[in-house]
Amino acid sequence: MFEDRRVYRRQHQKTGLVSFEITVKETNLNIQAQTDLSDQAIRATLKYRQYLETHILEHPEFATALSPLPLPRIAPAIVMDMMEAAKQTNVGPMAAVAGAMAEYVGRKLLALSPEVLVENGGDIFICSATQTVFSIYAGNSPLSMTTGILVEPQQHPFAMCTSSGTLGHSKSFGAADAVSVLAYSCSLADAAATALCNQVKEKGDIEKTLHQGKQIQGIQGIVIIKGEQIGLWGDLKLVRLP
C-alpha cells in the first residue's frame, strides 16, 4: 500500500511470534509465526504465483479487467476466490490479488504454526488466539498511525485489508486516505476495500459508502478515513495508538 512499510509493520508485531520477510518477484510478505518459516513461505508463494501467472497467460483479461469476469468452469482455487470476490464487490479480480496471496500463503503455514500473520502491502491475513490492534496508515490524515482498529480474538482466521486513493501504486478511482475492511475472506476484504475506496471522493461520501459496504455479504467491519473525518461500522472498535 505504501513504500516504507517498516514502521507500519512494527505496529503489528504479536507477542511471542517470530517476524520475518520474504520476497518473490513483486510479492513482498511480512510474516509472523511461532518459528521462522521462510523456506516454506517462499515455496507457497511460488506455487500460488505460478497458478496466477499461468491463468493470466491463458486469460490475459484477468490481469486488466476493472469489472467482474464470468466464472470459469475450472480454475485454481485462488483464481476462483479472486473472481468470486470481484463478483461480490463489482471490481476486477486483480483487486483481490494481494489479499488472496496473503491468505493462501498464510493457510499453508497454519499446518506448521497455529498462529500466523501474513501482511502483503497493507492487506493482512491472521489467525491468532489474542486480540489484535491494526494500525491505520492514511497518508497525510491526522488520524494516520495515531488510530488503530482493535479486533477481539476470532474463532476462525480472518482478514483486515486496506485500500487508499491517495497512497501507493494500486489503481483507485477514489480519494479516501484509507478504507479498511474486516472479513473472514482476505480476497473479499481486499476487493471490498478497493470497491469502497472508489466511492469516496470527498468527506460527505463516507456515510453512504459505509451503507453500501454493509450490503456486501461476508463483511464484518469497515473503517473509512478522509482527512480528519472517520466512519466506522461493524465488529471492531477504534483505539488510540501509543
Image (cartoon, rainbow, N blue to C red):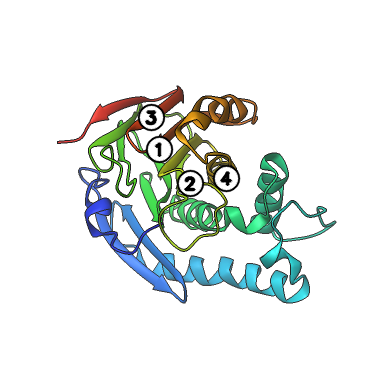
In terms of sequence position, does the residue under pointer 2 or pointer 1 come before the other? 2
Gap in Å between the C-alphas at discs 3 and 2? 14 Å
**Residue drawn at (39%, 72%), measured in percent from left and top?**
23
Would you say residue 157 is visible in this rendering?
A: no
Gap in Å between the C-alphas at discs 1 and 4? 12 Å
4 and 2 marks in contact (CB < 8 Å): no
Which secondary structure, mark 4?
helix
Gap in Å between the C-alphas at discs 2 and 1? 8 Å
Q: Is residue 68 above or below residue 26?
A: above
Give, as a three-letter code, the residue at label 2: Ala
Taking the image as shown, residue 136 lies to the left or right of residue 219, namely: left
The residue wearing badge 3 is 230
Q: Residues within 10 Å of mark 3 (few under 14, many from 20)?
A: some
The residue wearing badge 2 is 175
Q: Is residue 124 above or below residue 75?
A: above
Which secondary structure, mark 2?
loop
In terms of sequence position, does the residue under pointer 4 or pointer 3 come before the other? 4
Q: Is residue 231 above or below residue 187?
A: above
Residue closer to the observer: 239 or 170: 170
Instruction: Residue at the far right: name it.
Output: 73
Q: Is residue 172 above or below residue 185?
A: below
Name the mark on residue 2: none
In terms of sequence position, does the residue under pointer 4 or pointer 2 come before the other? 2
In terms of sequence position, does the residue under pointer 1 or pointer 4 come before the other? 4
Give, as a three-letter code, the residue at label 1: Lys
2 and 1 marks in contact (CB < 8 Å): yes
Name the mark on residue 226: 1
The residue wearing badge 4 is 198
